[in-house]
Each structure stands twice: as structure tokens, then as C-alpha cells.
Image: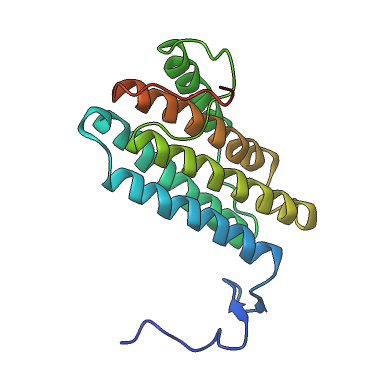
């Protein structure tokens, strides 16, 4: 059985309710941006350095949550992201940041292999957040306050994780000012 349906050949996408909307609609852009971030995290997981292997379960957990957030955006009356997920990320951010030297200046995205990939994941999470906000403005019932809080906190989480990964890999971060 082929994986292609040809239904989207004219620029529309079929929704869970059977209706078609433009592939340029805010809903499709939000789901696509979340998919992009989730896919990049798959690459991060596949490329984790040995010193950063401990990050794998947490990154897979985030991938699952991004999948659920995509479903929440796509299906009426569905909201699976809970406040406990935001609280968990905040605790993990604090744990990782407490293991690192304090930031005294802005740092350039990069560092070691895992840290650099996580910094890029952070930017994709920010893009997904912007797309979710646009869709929330149109359909606040599909991206609720907790969903917005989760996707906002995710970029902070990935920033902390990138710094933590550089620490685990023994890579010094580069300050933005020389």
C-alpha cells in the first residue's frame, strides 16, 4: 500500500475531522514547526556523545510530548500537556544550571557536538513556539495556556541542556563578546 494519497497535491491538508485546510494555515504551520523540532531531537539522540548518553531518556520524553502537542493542536477538545510537565522541566533546568558555572555574559550557540545540536534544537523550539502563538491567537481552544507555557519553557530547557552537555563533554563555551 503506498504512503502517498495525492490529497495534498493542490496545497491542502486533510484534518482529523475530514475537512481540508490550506497547508499555509496557522494550524498546519504550528504542527509542522513542532514536527521539525521533534525530528531534530531525533538527530540529537542519534548523535549523542558517550558522555551525554544520560540525556537520551529526557530527550525521548520531550519527543513524546511534542507528538502529543501536535495532536492537541489537530483535534478538538484534546489537551494532554499538563502543568506537571512544565514543573518537571523547571526542576531539570535548575538542576542542570546549578551544576554549571554561572553565566556572566551571553554565550555563542555551539560548543561540543551535542551542545551545538541542542542549541539548534532550542531555536527550532522557539520557532515552534511562535507558530503555536499564532495559531493560539486564532484558536485558543487548540493551544491552551499550559501548552503555550510548555513550548515556551522547552527552549529554556534545551538551552540548559546544551550548556550541561558541553559541561559533560568538557567543552568550554565561547562568550559572545571577545
> Is residue 120 visible from the viewing direction of this image?
yes
Report the residue that reaches farthest toward the right. Answer: 137
**Left or right of 109 in this view: 114:** left
Instruction: Give the colouring mode of the picture.
Output: rainbow
Image quarter (top left, top right, bottom left or bottom right) of the N terminus = bottom left
Up the image or down, 62 lies above or below 52; here it is below
> Is residue 75 visible from the viewing direction of this image?
no
Q: Nearer the viewer, residue 82 or 103?
A: 103
Query: How many numbered circles are shown?
Result: 0
| Residue plotted at (49% across, 19% down) | 91
Up the image or down, 64 lies above or below 20; here it is above
The image position of residue 126, as x and y in percent, is 60, 43
| Residue plotted at (39% across, 23% down) | 164
The image position of residue 43, as x and y in percent, is 34, 50
**Left or right of 15 in this view: 93:** left
The image position of residue 87, as x and y in percent, is 54, 24
Report the residue that reaches farthest toward the front. Answer: 178
The image position of residue 139, as x and y in percent, is 75, 56
| Residue plotted at (49% across, 16% down) | 94
Amino acid at each position: 500500500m503506498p504512503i502517498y494519497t495525492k490529497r495534498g497535491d493542490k496545497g491542502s491538508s486533510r484534518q482529523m475531522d475530514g475537512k481540508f485546510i490550506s497547508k499555509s494555515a496557522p494550524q498546519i504551520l504550528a504542527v509542522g514547526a513542532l514536527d521539525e523540532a521533534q525530528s531534530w531531537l531525533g538527530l540529537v539522540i542519534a548523535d549523542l556523545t558517550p558522555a551525554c548518553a544520560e540525556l537520551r531518556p529526557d530527550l525521548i520524553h520531550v519527543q513524546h510530548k511534542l507528538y502529543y502537542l501536535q495532536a492537541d493542536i489537530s483535534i478538538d477538545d484534546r489537551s494532554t500537556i499538563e502543568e506537571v510537565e512544565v514543573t518537571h522541566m523547571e526542576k531539570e533546568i535548575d538542576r542542570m544550571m546549578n551544576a554549571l558555572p554561572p553565566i556572566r555574559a551571553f554565550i555563542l550557540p555551539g560548543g561540543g557536538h551535542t551542545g551545538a545540536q541542542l542549541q539548534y534544537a532550542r531555536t527550532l523550539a522557539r520557532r515552534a513556539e511562535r507558530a503555536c502563538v499564532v495559531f493560539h491567537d486564532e484558536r485558543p481552544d487548540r493551544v491552551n495556556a499550559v501548552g503555550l507555557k510548555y513550548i515556551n519553557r522547552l527552549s529554556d530547557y534545551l538551552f540548559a541542556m546544551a550548556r550541561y552537555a558541553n559541561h559533560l563533554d568538557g567543552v568550554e563555551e565561547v562568550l559572545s563578546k571577545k
